[in-house]
Amino acid sequence: MRVLLMGCSRIGMLVALALWQEGHQVRVMDTAPERFLILPPEAREEKGMTILGNGTREEDLQAAGIGEVDAFLALSDDDNCNGLAAQKAKYRFKVPLVVCLVQDPARVPIYQAHGIRVISPTQMAANLVLEALSPSRVPSRPPPT
């Protein structure tokens, strides 16, 4: 699979590495060259893996080869940039699979309505906390003696 990933954050780095280690062709785009330092040297030094650019700009997306990818992952730390880049990938460049990271759970249904797969770490964390508090997981207090 050919993947263009926008945002070399901790999440972006982990996803990029996992896909790269599975043998997929991965390109990581970010606006700050120092963000690529989070990648291990062997990945960072692979030709074409890191691309300096802004995923909200059509010129940068074209230069990164968005027209040839099977998936676009908007994983930056900025919900607005992720949403805009995901919509461009989906509608302008017709990328078959678009995934968007969204911190604000209120935005999830908006992007889902446009056929964009959405991941909300905030909602996922809240769900895990609530699951940890479920009666089957909370130890009961022994009766007083």
Image: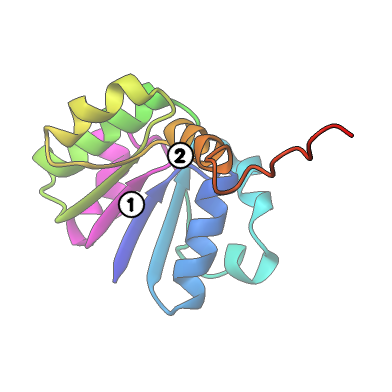
- Farthest residue to the right: give it: 145
Left or right, residue 64 beside residue 66: right
Q: Quadrant of residue 79?
A: top left
Label 2: few (<14), some or many (≥20) within 10 Å?
Answer: few
Picture coordinates of residue 32 (x, y %)?
57, 36
Kind of residue sitting beneath label 1:
Ala
Which residue is at a point 11% across and 34% down the rendered structure image?
A: 114
Left or right, residue 41 beside residue 132: right
Magenta segment includes 72: yes
Picture coordinates of residue 78 (x, y %)?
45, 26
Q: CA distance from mark 2 to mark 1?
A: 31 Å
- Of pointers 2 and 1, the one earlier in the residue sequence: 1
Please tell me how many numbered marks the rendered image carries.
Answer: 2
Over which residues does the magenta segment extend? 52-75
Disc 1 is placed on an element classified as loop
Picture coordinates of residue 31 (x, y %)?
50, 35
Q: Quadrant of residue 6?
A: top left
- Farthest residue to the bottom: give it: 23
Which residue is at a point 89% across and 34% down the rendered structure image?
A: 145
Q: Is 145 situated above or below 98? A: above
Picture coordinates of residue 19 (x, y %)?
44, 68
Front residue of this view, candidates 1 and 126: 126
Which residue is at a point 60% across and 46% down the rendered structure image?
A: 10
Q: Which residue is mark 1?
A: 64
> Which quarter of the image is occupied by the N terminus?
bottom left
Magenta segment includes 63: yes
Front residue of this view, candidates 97 and 121: 121
Disc 2 is placed on an element classified as helix
Q: Are marks 2 and 1 in contact (CB under 8 Å)?
A: no
Q: Is 96 situated above or below 2? A: above
Q: Which residue is mark 2?
A: 124
Front residue of this view, candidates 55 and 48: 55
